[in-house]
Image (cartoon, grey):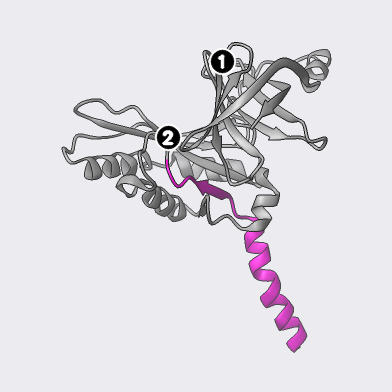
Amino acid sequence: MKKIITLVVILLPLLAMAGDIYVVVPNRFSFQKEDNQYQLGSLTKFLLEKEGFKVYFENEVPQELLNNACDGLRADLKNTSGLMTSKLQLVLIGCKGKEVYTSEVGKSREKEYRKSYQEALRNAFKGTALAEFKKSYRSGQGAVVNSQRSEVSSEQQASNSTPQTSHLTLYAKKTDGGYELYEEKTNELRYRLRTTFAPEVFLVQEIGTNTNGVLQKDKEGQWRFTFVRGLEGREESLETVIKF
């Protein structure tokens, strides 16, 4: 009987973890000048936990999640504030750079920055949209950004799954939040990288198109970009050489 009770005590936390949706909050959002400025990181973590998510700051991620980066989501904030109004949106990003959830715009006209940003963030969490996303994502329905995807032929799917090789050689310059990648021949800025909780996985912004994606090393040790293009969500994979 004691063995059964002990087994139940061990298994219950593991079963609970299996149903968790993990979210990683960056120490600093892209528009911030310092870590946790205006306590927006802490407030984002608190509000997500209030909605039932399992949340970590990027410097606190457990090893099992580091080993399986695609098991978690990454939180970001879109800041479209103007002179008189603070405007924030919560964005949740999957492991391939897909935005799987974007909230309504939270607004505030408070004059003091800290109060204004915090009120805007709280307003972005209002309503039932995040709870509905959580339910659908857990059931496997929320992993697709655009559910109205057009059908793709088997030939197109096959060609999309084959990685292309870039003839560009890129070199990296360190920034506060990650790296900038420049074309070696022309010194032209091509991509911006943001670090993630996995050491060889970066979120990517393609300069010129503002397309978001992911950069990571494959099993052969080759750097590979993955982008999701167009309304149909066409996945593009591109191998490249990067000098860090």
Look at the magenta stretch and give its main secondary structure.
helix
Q: Specify the segment rendered in magenta.
A: 1-28
* Residue 224 drawn at (x, y percent): 72, 28
Q: Is residue 175 left or right of residue 94?
A: left
Q: Looking at the picture, which amino acid does disc 2 mark?
A: Ser
- Vertical arrangement, residue 71 with respect to residue 102, above or below: below
Crowding near the residue tagged with mark 1, few <14, some 14–19, many ≥20 C-alpha atoms within 10 Å:
few
Whole-number angstrom distance, CA of label 1 to CA of label 2: 24 Å
* Residue 130 drawn at (x, y percent): 47, 42
Q: Is residue 105 left or right of residue 219?
A: left
Q: Nearer the viewer, residue 186 or 107?
A: 186
Q: Looking at the picture, which amino acid does disc 1 mark?
A: Asn
The disc at residue 167 is: none
* Residue 137 drawn at (x, y percent): 60, 41
Q: Which residue does the numbered mark 1 point to in the structure image?
A: 187
The C terminus lies in quadrant: top right
The disc at residue 30 is: 2
Q: Tell me, yes or no, if residue 75 can be seen here.
A: yes
Residue at image position (54%, 57%) is: 60
Residue 240, image quadrant: top right
Residue at image position (77%, 31%) is: 222
